[in-house]
Amino acid sequence: MPAIKNVAHAGAVGALGEPVLTELVNAGFNVTVLTRAAGKVPAGFADKVKEAVVDYNNPASLKSALAGIDAVVSTLGAPAVGDAQRNLVDASVEAGVQRFIPSNFGCDQENALARQLPVFAEKVKTEDYLVEKAKNTPLSYTFVYNKTSCWRWTSSDERLNDGTVLHDRRLT
């Protein structure tokens, strides 16, 4: 797999999104922030990232924004992890994106009991969808499962030490 240099970030304005955006920029990636409306790039980042206004319900809009992108990092909030995120997966495949990291943070969805909880239904559906897409396309993915916690009320050091699990998979 070629080196990942160009990264699209969906959901950069949320509680998790802005810290992730900070780390992507600090790591030296060329970041394109996907927004629903112009001017929504978080303060302090306008001169460090590109902004692409997208409609998550319009596959052509998403595909166009992902042209030349190597990886997509999604930190979309709960209302958008359903169809919007699956549309983003489809557009990633069509645009030739190499890696997709979905917004499925919160609990290990490989745990059979967790998969049954209604609160995770859309995340599980999206995860299963991504696994199926990766079976027949060059798209690979990484799932990030962190222990369910009160993210907004803990420091980043606490978050890193509270049981984060990374699942990096490529089905061939």
Image (tube, rainbow, N blue to C red):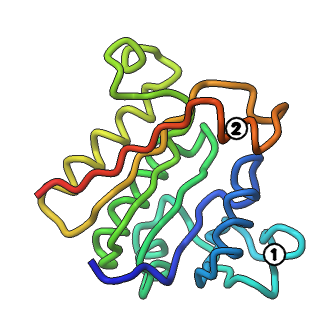
Instruction: Look at label 2 and name its amino acid.
Output: Arg
Residue 96 located left or right of residue 74: left
Within 10 Å of the Cα at label 2, are there few (<14), some (14-19), or many (20+) other Cα atoms?
some
Q: Position of residue 104 (x, y in %)?
A: 49, 40
> Residue 77 — which label?
none
Mark with earlier residue (2, 1) = 1
Q: Nearer the viewer, residue 46 or 141?
A: 141
Instruction: Name the quadrant containing residue 160.
Output: top right
Assign a secondary structure to mark 2: helix
Residue lying at 22% horizontally and 55% vertically, measured from the top left: 133
Relative horizontal placement of residue 78, taking residue 89 as reference (left or right): right
For the point 28% across and 39% down, which residue is it?
Answer: 128
Residue 10, quarter of the rendered image: bottom right
**Residue 111: x %, y % from top left:** 35, 20
Q: Which mark is residue 39?
A: 1
What residue does disc 2 label?
159
Residue at position x 54%, y 56% in the image: 74
Q: Which corner quadrant holds the C terminus?
A: bottom left
SS category of the residue bearing label 1: loop
Split into 4 quadrants, where in the image is the N terminus? bottom left
Residue 33, quarter of the rendered image? bottom right
Q: Is residue 23 left or right of residue 126?
A: right
Picture layout, residue 1 above or below residue 18: below
**Residue 38 percent location from the top left of the image:** 76, 76
